[in-house]
Image: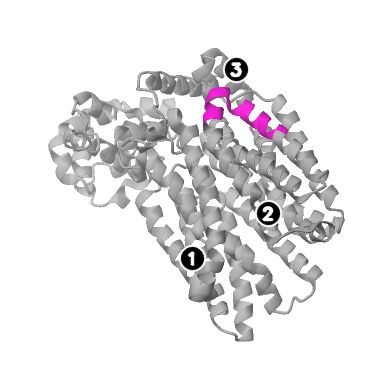
């Protein structure tokens, strides 16, 4: 069922990509049909991102108030209306208005679609499923290129075909309910439980459904006890600010990696290497579109396997290297360097599609607390569209001042800065339930310290029973051996006795300690390697206790309390 949900909601991405790409093939024939001034042409082509700005501004509030499903149903109607209107125009200003409507729908869908999937998907598949939106965008762009090539001068039919996926989205959403998390907050646990069971394809009484529902309802009860969001300023609150930095920062780096400028420059690269005819350039552009689709599939396959941060490292490094290759080709007139620029162009599209394209959408749907999630995603989406405009607007200005090579060198430096940003600010959310991410933010710990280790599936009942054989004395001996291996050893030494008690009470930590004790058979632990696969859980346990200590809680303005440590 969850794949059906992702496929239906993913139609919003196809609509976005199609509406962005179809104008390229229709523009030449529109010039022949109408007298279009440069200003009107600019307004007509920029109407989609302009409308998306307005759509993103209202989408967060609408999704919270009326529901994720209702927002997507509204977007589907606007997609259909805009496509039909664009096919019936008799003047350019009509097309600008039609594309403005389409852009508004894009702005709503670009926010609500990843949100809907993230709140519906199992934690272990969330990254791949949210990435379907970006895959759909690339398919929509490629589809627009193919239709442009196939329909030749029938531009009205090009625009009209955009109504078909809009109709598919409308029909598909009629068969779906809202997300379990929105329903839990607005309709109660019974309705949320039925929706969750349907999504998982399991009976409502199934233990897995009940466990996930209990986690959602507990987060809802915790949320009900907190002061409610007061508006946009809530995003600047101390506990939410790290999520805002990640959500907006990744979109800023995505845009300033130069994706729109690279696409803009692609025809020039093709022309310089000898692709002189219009049809050949279109075929080459379709080839770039195909690379975009294929590498997005690669990114989807990797995102829940290697994690978000490793994939971001690969994406930023690959994009920075490839932009340097394009800059090298642009700085010189040597014919062989044009081939280097082509290779750089293909490599850049591959790196972007597998990493920098989908990951900002995935991360923005994960990092915000639920009470501010839709609004936070609205701000991130606004930043995306606003910076999209800045990059496109600044490109010719920068080219005239520092040259084409200088512009791409600047974009390459931004990508290398993205490596630093990822290390310092981006958490690893792979496999971590949304409620666990929210609890981590609420604890005051740095967001980039989030790890999936202690939020993984619980140990088996048999392993828990076996671990009861570990005596408190053995646990204490292991804890005292572990503390010197931790970077927080000075803070943890006075807490050794408390750490032992906590470890014995926590099933997952006790199971890990028992496994290490049986393997080591009393031998002294000299290194992290000796801990084996349990090392990640044990070191994360020490880190959690360190950041719940009284000194840390006082440093972030929280009252130190034993209960905070006991909660680890």
Q: Nearer the viewer, residue 190 or 338?
A: 338
Q: Locate residue 19 relative to residue 371 in the image: left or right.
A: right
Instruction: Note whether 242 is above or below 295 in the view shown.
Output: above
User: Residue 406, image x and y in percent?
Assistant: 49, 74
- Cα–Cα span, label 1 and label 2: 24 Å
In front: label 1 or label 2? 2
Q: Locate residue 33 relative to residue 553 in the image: left or right.
A: right
Instruction: Note whether 375 is above or below 142 in the view shown.
Output: above
Choose top left, top right, bottom left or bottom right for residue 271: bottom right
User: Residue 413, image x and y in percent?
Assistant: 44, 66
Question: Residue, x 59% and y 28% (percent of image)?
Answer: 68
Q: Which residues are magenta?
A: 61-77
Q: Earlier in the sequence, mark 3 or mark 2?
A: 2
| Disc number for residue 506 | none
Q: Secondary structure at mark 1?
A: helix
Question: Residue, x 78% and y 40% (percent of image)?
Answer: 85
- Queried whether the magenta region covers residue 458, the answer comes back as no
Q: Nearer the viewer, residue 502 or 545?
A: 545
Question: Residue, x 16% and y 32% (percent of image)?
Answer: 497
- Of helix, strand and loop, which mostly describes the magenta segment? helix
User: Residue 557, image x and y in percent?
Assistant: 21, 33
Which quadrant of the figure contains the N terminus?
A: top right
Q: Earlier in the sequence, mark 1 or mark 2?
A: 2
Tell me if label 1 and label 3 are in contact, CB under 8 Å.
no
Q: Earlier in the sequence, mark 1 or mark 3?
A: 3
- Cα–Cα span, label 3 and label 2: 44 Å
The residue wearing badge 2 is 45
């Amino acid at each position: 069922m969850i794949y059906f949900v992702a496929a239906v909601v993913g139609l919003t991405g196809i609509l976005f990509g199609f509406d962005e790409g179809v104008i390229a093939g229709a523009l030449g024939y529109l010039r022949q049909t109408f007298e279009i001034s440069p200003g009107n042409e600019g307004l007509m082509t920029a109407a989609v991102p302009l409308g998306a700005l307005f759509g993103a501004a209202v989408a967060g509030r609408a999704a919270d108030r009326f529901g994720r499903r209702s927002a997507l149903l509204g977007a589907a109607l606007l997609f259909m209306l805009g496509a039909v209107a664009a096919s019936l125009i008799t003047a350019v200003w009509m097309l600008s208005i039609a594309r403005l409507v389409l852009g508004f729908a894009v702005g709503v869908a670009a926010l609500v679609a990843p949100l809907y999937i993230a709140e519906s998907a199992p934690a272990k598949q969330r990254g791949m499923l949210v990435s379907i939106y970006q895959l759909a965008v690339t398919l929509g762009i490629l589809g627009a290129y193919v239709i442009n090539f196939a329909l030749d001068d029938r531009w009205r039919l090009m625009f009209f075909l955009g109504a078909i996926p809009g109709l598919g989205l409308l029909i598909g959403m009629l068969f779906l309910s809202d997300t379990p998390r929105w329903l839990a907050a607005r309709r109660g646990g019974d309705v949320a439980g039925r929706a969750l069971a349907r999504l998982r394809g399991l009976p409502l009484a199934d233990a897995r459904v009940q466990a996930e529902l209990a986690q959602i309802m507990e987060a809802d009860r915790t949320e009900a006890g907190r002061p409610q969001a007061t508006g946009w300023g809530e995003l600047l609150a101390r506990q939410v600010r790290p999520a805002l930095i990640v959500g907006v920062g990744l979109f800023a780096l995505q845009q300033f990696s130069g994706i729109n400028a690279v696409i803009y420059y692609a025809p020039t690269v093709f022309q310089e290497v000898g692709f002189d005819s219009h049809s050949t350039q279109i075929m080459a552009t379709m080839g770039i579109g195909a690379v975009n689709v294929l590498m997005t599939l690669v990114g989807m396959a990797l995102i829940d396997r290697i994690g978000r941060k490793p994939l971001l490292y690969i994406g930023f490094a690959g994009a920075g290297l490839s932009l340097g290759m394009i800059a090298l080709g642009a700085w010189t007139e040597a014919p062989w360097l044009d081939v280097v620029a082509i290779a750089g162009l293909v490599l850049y599209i591959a790196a972007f599609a597998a990493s920098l394209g989908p990951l900002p959408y995935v991360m923005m749907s994960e990092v915000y607390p639920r009470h501010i999630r839709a609004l936070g995603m609205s701000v991130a989406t606004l930043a995306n569209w606003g910076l999209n405009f800045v990059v496109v607007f600044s490109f010719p200005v920068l080219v005239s001042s520092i040259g084409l090579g200088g512009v791409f060198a600047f974009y390459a430096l931004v990508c290398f800065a993205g490596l630093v940003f990822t290390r310092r600010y981006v958490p690893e959310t792979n496999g971590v339930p949304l409620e666990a991410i929210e609890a981590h933010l609420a604890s005051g710990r740095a967001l980039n310290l989030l790890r999936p280790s202690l939020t993984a599936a619980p140990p088996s009942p048999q392993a828990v029973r076996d671990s009861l054989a570990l005596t408190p004395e053995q646990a204490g001996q292991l804890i005292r051996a572990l503390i010197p291996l931790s970077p927080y050893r000075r803070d943890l030494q006075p807490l050794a006795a408390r750490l032992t008690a906590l470890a014995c009470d926590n099933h997952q930590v006790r199971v890990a300690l028992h496994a290490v004790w049986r393997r080591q058979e009393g031998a002294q632990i000299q290194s992290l390697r000796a801990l084996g696969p349990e090392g990640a859980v044990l070191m994360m346990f020490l880190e959690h206790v360190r950041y719940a200590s009284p000194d840390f809680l006082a440093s972030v303005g929280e009252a130190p309390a034993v209960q905070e440590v006991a909660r680890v």
